[in-house]
Amino acid sequence: MSGQDGATEPPLDTLTLSVIQAALQQACDEMDLAFSRAAFSPVIAEANDRSDGIYAADDGALIAQGNQGLPVFVGVMQYSTRTVIEMIRDGRCQPPEEGDIYIVNDPYLGGTHLMDVRFVMPVYRAGKIFCWLSNTGHWPDIGGAVPGGFSASATAVEQEGLRLPPVKLFKGGRLDPEIHAIICSNIRVADQRIGDIKAQAAALVVGRERLLEILDRYGDDTVSAAIRELRSRAAAQMRAEIARIPDGTYRSRAYVDSDGVVDEPLTIALAVEKKGDTLTFDFSGSSRPCAGPMNSVLATTMSSVYLAVRHIFPDVPINAGAFEPLVVRRPEGTFLDARYPRPVSGCAAEVSQRIAEAVFAALVQALPEKVTAAPAGSSGNFALGGHDPARGRDYVMYQISGGGYGGDFYHDRLANGGSPPRLSQSPPLPVTGQALSVLYRHYALREGSGGAGKHRGGFGLAYEVELLRGEARASFVMDHGRFGPQGVLGGRDGAVNEVIVFRDGEAHIPPHLSKEQDIPLKAGDSVRVGTPGGGGYGDPRERDPELVRRDVELGYYTPEQARDLFGVAL
């Protein structure tokens, strides 16, 4: 290969390849850190509901992504960056100049739901685009019918909020005041968004600086060669992992409680065909597009498959090469291939997790030592929008919750962990309490919620939050309220999600169990949530009796549950 001066460079050695790989990863990690540290909203600054990555100049293929970024964005940002590139090429989008940053949140252009707002920036080298940097941040509000954007009964995407095609929010490094004004005119608590906007842009600038340092140190051709080699090796490593799976077709089903409008379950029917060193995923037997917001756009569906396989084979590096042996047939005519104007607010937070659950349930048949039972599988999206009379200002609270992980061949699993497609976490309670007019009356592990098994599932979370003053409206887009996370190989399902709203002392359970919007609350009213536990792995009667006794001593299960679930008399 030739260097910038035309000289021939020596072959890329393993040490240099490893150093460049680590440097690219570090640049992404630093973008993540800069984004969270500078962001205004707790959902980004504390819950880390964001991600940053580096993408190829010609097709947007993933080069590297931060370790602390949300896994569901791994494939999604690849597709959204590719869409921006394609729209620039065919003239539907203004061509870039140095210092420009595009903003886009259109779900149908390689996205998720409207609240996940993506920034895309070209990095120039010698007058040409060397690569693209992109990041995604979950904005706590994007307009629409309800505060927070999670409209449980939306029947069209316009009801969910402001939809932006790729437009230049920053031009030559300067914020475009007209685009910014349009955004602020369509969202709640608009004065607070400038902090998130500047933080999101600053993270990309940090990434550009670090990337240019890498290029200056090693040379453009050497870094480009390393990127090609890393992609090739990731593809080879993934193919080697897949080749160990016995050839055949593995089938599974997972269920979404309802779409929030029609109170009927939605089915995800998956057939995974393993042939040679390739896995083909076919969702064609799944339910048709739904009326409510539980449709999934294609980019989210594909990314959900990628992240599930990534959990099964965690040693394979994250880049576009790892996706090459994974063929996802487009599930046309199903709710997993949403087209405009289908509402999609539940796709990234909920449907993505049902897709991953279906992948786990299928492949555990072939890889029982590598695949877990189903995790909690709900992000517990709870949005509260209101007015705080003591502070004289409006607010939007966005609460996400953890749940239990599914048991596996070797271990019991984590309690109250972030959902695998997201890995984001709840903002610290003192931060929420100080910023908003709410009080957490209860916050603890949800005892008894882990699915029984030889290795039990982790436990969910139980919390209750009370409105202290003023008035507010509560909305929920959660799931697993009808069907608990699946146990495998004889394990029991984890406990279902539970939501109860107390108004004037009267208990109200949403008709769709964990989906409803615009519930009016006043001071003294509260919301109680119990998140799902993970599914159990293996026959509960094979569990070590000493482990059952320990669980009872710790209060995880009652003596009656020990007897009924595990056959252990205490």
Image (cartoon, rainbow, N blue to C red):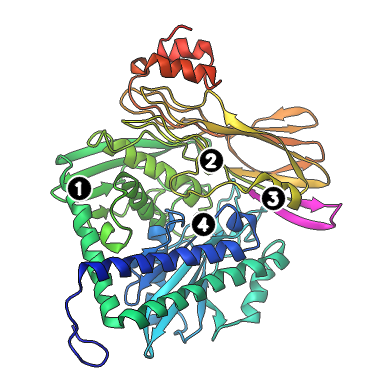
Instruction: Report x, y in % for residue 398.
Output: 64, 50
For badge 1, the amino acid type reads Ile
Q: How far apart are marks 2 and 4 (CA)?
A: 20 Å
| First in residue order: circle 3 vs circle 4 | 4
Q: Which mark is residue 402?
A: 2
Q: How far apart are marks 4 and 1 (CA)?
A: 31 Å
Q: How far apart are marks 2 and 1 (CA)?
A: 30 Å
Q: Residue at x 50, y 48 (%)?
A: 349
User: Can you tell which of label 4 and label 1 is closer to the viewer?
Assistant: 1
Instruction: Looking at the picture, tell me which residue is in the foreground, 269 or 202.
Output: 202
Q: How far apart are marks 2 and 3 (CA)?
A: 17 Å
Q: How far apart are marks 3 and 4 (CA)?
A: 26 Å
Q: Which residue is drawn at 20% across and 86% down?
A: 2
**Is disc 3 placed on a helix, strand or loop?**
helix
Up/down of 530 relative to 324, above or below: above
For badge 4, the amino acid type reads His
| First in residue order: circle 2 vs circle 4 | 4
User: Given contact means CB atoms under 8 Å apart, are the residues at marks 2 and 3 in contact?
Assistant: no
What secondary structure characterizes most of the magenta part? Answer: strand
Residue range of the region highlighted in magenta in the rendering: 386-398
**Is disc 4 placed on a helix, strand or loop?**
loop
For disc 2, the neighbor class at 10 Å (few under 14, some 14 to 19, many from 20) is many
Q: What residue is shown with label 4?
A: 113
Question: Which quarter of the figure is the N terminus placed in?
Answer: bottom left
Q: Residue at x 49, y 67 (%)?
A: 31
Up/down of 557 relative to 450, above or below: above
For badge 2, the amino acid type reads Gly
Q: What residue is shown with label 3?
A: 431
| First in residue order: circle 4 vs circle 1 | 4
- Residue farthest bottom in this picture: 5
Q: In this view, does 258 lie to the left or right of 25?
A: right
- Asked whether residue 497 appears in the rendered view, the answer is no
